[in-house]
Image: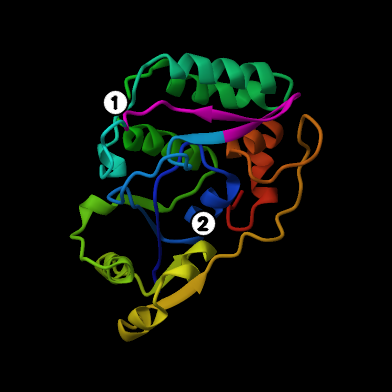
Amino acid sequence: MKKVAILQSNYIPWKGYFDMIAAVDEFILYDDMQYTRRDWRNRNQIKTPQGIQWLTVPVLVKGKYHQKIRETELDDADWAASHWKALVQNYRRAPYFDEIAVWLEPLYIANSYTHISQLNHTFINAICKFLNIKTVIRNSWDYSLLDGKTERLADLCQQAGGTEYISGPAAKDYVEEKIFTDMNIKLTWFDYVGYPEYPQLWGEFSHGVTILDLLFNCGKDAHRYMRHVQP
């Protein structure tokens, strides 16, 4: 049995994203999809004393209506220092800030990223390393791509040698289960419900913020607040 999941890359994603990575044997970053504005590809949320705040990476989108995620270029280099400053200001009191900053700050300071995919992949891989997630991570362009939403996903899974496809629940709106059945691939819906709360700064608890919030507050104990990440 080999479990495969396929998702677009996100900027410093929330804990559920990494829980799905940890739940499978191979995770395919699906950045051959069209870039969507005001989505999670180039932004995420942190907690502050004033409430939830967005951290957004500026990208070049004007006139580029059909560009793929992996073709999307960053707009300027100043965002990195700004994002790191925001993280320092709002998380320096967190118990594990210094431990996380040792490997996280260089990712911002050594800012030589040109495309959002490159940036996202770098951060996702670094966070997986800290969480000891051993899942193989590949890119969708490592494989050939068919036409058709479900046909492409099922074929990618099959090319990767997958016997079970793990999908986020939002895909129920468009995934045709019969296509997976006909290819002898088990389709399983990932469940994001029921995560326990952890000690979190700044008021009312929020599950949907970047995983950096969990790492700053819990360090190596982050796995206790996820389902599939092992210590």
Q: Position of residue 145 (x, y in %)?
A: 21, 61
Q: Residue 159's quadrant in the figure?
A: bottom left
Residue furthest to the left: 144
Amino acid at pointer 2: Met
Q: Position of residue 224 (x, y in %)?
A: 69, 49
First-in-chain label (2 vs 1): 2
Residue appearing at x 35%, y 18% in the figure: 76
Residue appearing at x 66%, y 16% in the figure: 89
The answer to whether residue 168 is visible is no
User: Dot 1, crowdedness within 10 Å: few (<14), some or many (≥20)?
Assistant: some
Helix, strand or loop at disc 1?
loop
Residue appearing at x 75%, y 52% in the figure: 196
- Left or right of residue 132, residue 117 in this image: left
> How much space separates mark 2 and mark 1, taking CA atoms?
27 Å
Relative to 197, say whether 193 is above or below.
below
Which sits in the foreground, 71 or 214? 71
Q: Residue 124's quadrant in the figure?
A: top left
Between circles 2 and 1, the one closer to the viewer is: 1
Relative to 206, say whether 101 is above or below.
above
* Residue range of the region highlighted in magenta in the rendering: 45-61
Given contact means CB atoms under 8 Å apart, are the residues at marks 2 and 1 in contact?
A: no
Amino acid at pointer 1: Thr
Q: Position of residue 51 (x, y in %)?
A: 73, 30
- Left or right of residue 70, residue 124 in this image: right
Q: Residue 87's quadrant in the figure?
A: top right
Which residue is disc 2 drawn over?
20
Helix, strand or loop at disc 2?
helix
For residue 114, which numbered disc appears in the image?
Answer: 1
- Left or right of residue 25, residue 183 in this image: left
